[in-house]
């Protein structure tokens, strides 16, 4: 039997989609430059809840940028996010509150001023450790680049809770900054 090449059938292979179709750089630049350069936070509302809320400033679906997904997360008292995993990395700049992450079954505590890094392909969940105060994080992701390369994989392990925590009954995300 001969020596196998690196293309043998026993190895996994990775495929990246072709870039095809009509694409005009000049038209794309004109489109991007015609978009607003400032998005007013007060015009963007939180969604989701009742334990974890999201306010998306720029994301792939709005077509405003090509490399970033930026959103604000607010966790109600004792609130948790969905447990999930995705290919792209994410950085959570903690604006206020105290809490922790569970990454691949390991706990990482955080507080205001910290940055929590979610690595590629990590199953994780975000937790507010306070039973009486909310916590906030500004989230920065390179998700659009992964989507462009057709490398987006996201899996929900446990969905976002649909009921508030006992201490979070009636909690509403803070729509405006103080």
Image: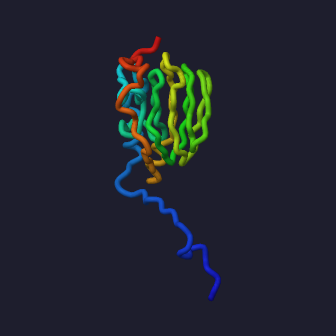
Q: Quadrant of the N terminus?
A: bottom right
The residue furthest right is 3
What percent of the width, then of the height, locates residue 56? Answer: 41, 30
**In the displayed structure, would residue 95 be above or below residue 155?**
above
The residue furthest front is 166
What percent of the width, then of the height, locates residue 94? Answer: 56, 25
Residue at image point 42% right, 57% down? 19
Closest to the observer: 108 or 90? 108
What percent of the width, then of the height, locates residue 70? Answer: 47, 32
Closest to the observer: 25 or 3? 3
What percent of the width, then of the height, locates residue 13? Answer: 52, 66
Residue at image point 41% right, 17% down? 174
Relative placement, left or right, of 4 versus 64 is right
**Rendered image quadrant of residue 64:** top left
**In the displayed structure, would residue 16 be above or below residue 41?**
below
**Rendered image quadrant of residue 167:** top left
**Rendered image quadrant of residue 171:** top left
Residue at image point 55% right, 73% down? 10
Relative placement, left or right, of 33 versus 13 is left
Residue at image point 47% right, 59% down? 16
């Amino acid at each position: 039997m001969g020596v196998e090449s690196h293309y043998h059938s026993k190895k996994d292979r990775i495929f990246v989609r072709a870039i095809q179709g009509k694409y005009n750089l000049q038209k794309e630049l004109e489109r991007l430059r015609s978009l607003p350069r400032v998005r007013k936070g007060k015009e963007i509302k939180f969604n989701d809840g009742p334990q974890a809320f999201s306010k998306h400033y720029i994301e792939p679906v709005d077509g405003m940028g090509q490399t970033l997904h930026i959103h604000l997360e607010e966790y109600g008292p004792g609130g948790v996010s969905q447990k999930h995993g995705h290919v792209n990395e994410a950085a959570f700049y903690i604006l206020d509150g105290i809490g922790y992450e569970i990454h691949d079954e390991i706990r990482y505590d955080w507080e205001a001023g910290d940055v929590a890094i979610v690595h590629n392909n990590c199953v994780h969940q975000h937790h507010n450790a306070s039973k009486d105060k909310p916590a906030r994080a500004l989230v920065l992701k390179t998700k659009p680049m992964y989507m462009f390369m057709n490398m987006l994989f996201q899996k929900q392990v446990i969905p976002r809770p649909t009921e508030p925590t006992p201490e979070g009954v009636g909690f509403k995300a803070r729509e405006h900054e103080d």
